[in-house]
Image (spheres, rainbow, N blue to C red):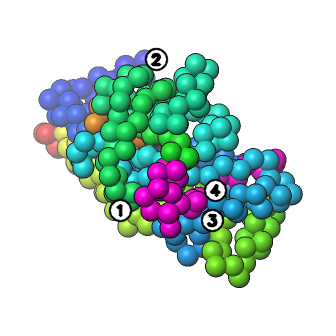
Amino acid sequence: MVVLKILIRNAFRNRLRTILTIFGVAIAILSFGLLRTVVSAWYAGADASSATRLVTRNAISIIFTLPLSYKDKIRQVEGVKIVSWGNWFGAYYIDEKNFFANFCVEPVSYLELYPEFVLSQDARRAFMNDRKGCIAGRKLADKFKWKVGDNIPLKGTIYPGTWDFVLRGIYKGRDKTIDETQFFFHWDYLNETLRKTVPGRADQVGFYMVGVSRPDLATDVSTSIDGMFKNSYAETLTETEKAFNLGFIAMTDAILMVIQVVSLLIIIIIMAVVANTMAMTTRERIRDYAIMKTLGFGGGVIAALIFGESLVITLVGCGVGILLTFPVAGIFGQKLAILFPVFNVSAQTVYLDVLAAVIVALAAAVIPTRRAIRIRIAEGLRRVG
């Protein structure tokens, strides 16, 4: 306890410089934490994926469709527990800037596959019984101030025209890692409309969601499904839901790399700031350290004082930065809910913040400590300041 008091007094001997350094560390930790949260948000969809869900799509590209008739054959594959299907709808609400993820799905099987979408029984029943009914995530409904029973017109891009829906339910995520910005409606509503307007596009699905009995069956089931449709006019590619989501993330590898490089540069910059502070502090106290040597204190004690002071300054700044990260991330999450549906500061990000702060503190104190230990007593005593 006495040692800690000494370290705190030493750290705040020059209050203005210390406070400015702490402020700089806090801003750097805040920036580092937000950038790491952005990276985590990018991978949120993959991290929340289930090991028992597979995605079957056209082997050429996701933009090509598959026949609806495939569903009956996929059901017959050993290990398959449930099959659902759907299409990416690609519509927007009123204005093009109001774009969000919207899908038409087979509602019964799809909601069974995704128990993490929590919906009341009344809402589920109303949704199932209304062909033009839809459900939306809580964050999406909050953004547009939708209420159950509202009429929601969407303007189609892939499927042109104005499509009218009635909001029958608002789902919540089972936990904070679940995307609450999606919009779902009946696949039959789309298909019946296409049969009347564009018959050639009817009875086609964009993807099949396949639920398997056990995670260890995923590879065998994927191979069986793809083998079943090999050499057909619409070959399939089946992969785990996580692999499917990571395929989209791979398209943005360059952006993620830039974000990670910037986060490392922030740590290097703040390391230079703390090192400069410790260098000035050590230079001012060379005479004190020389006196300590004359009293019999060894280099280990001096090193402990300098490293300890560096740790106090850096960890205080780190604590302030971590405390700021949560409210700032909350604001970012609200403003960027559509782009980053899941934007939460993870425990891993906090651990990385602390680790980065400790590394900065230790690295910044190395050179000043070496200089203080190696200086001769006579030379140190001649120093005035």
Q: What is the span of residues highlighted in magenta in the rendered image? A: 190-215
Q: Position of residue 41 (x, y in %)?
A: 44, 45
Residues at discs 2 and 3 in contact (Cβ within 8 Å) = no
Disc number placed over residue 67 in the picture, else none: 3
SS label for mark 2: loop
Q: Mark 1 points at which residue?
A: 255
* Comes first in the chain, label 2 or label 4: 2
Disc number placed over residue 208 in the picture, else none: 4
As measured in the structure, the alpha-carbon distance from the residue carrying label 2 to the one carrying label 1 is 47 Å
Q: Where is residue 187 in the image (x, y as percent from the top left)?
A: 54, 47
Q: Identify the amino acid type marked 3.
A: Pro
Residues at discs 4 and 1 in contact (Cβ within 8 Å) = no
SS label for mark 3: strand
Q: Mark 2 points at which residue?
A: 1
* Comes first in the chain, label 3 or label 4: 3
Residue shown at 39%/53% (left/top)?
Answer: 90
Residues at discs 3 and 4 in contact (Cβ within 8 Å) = no
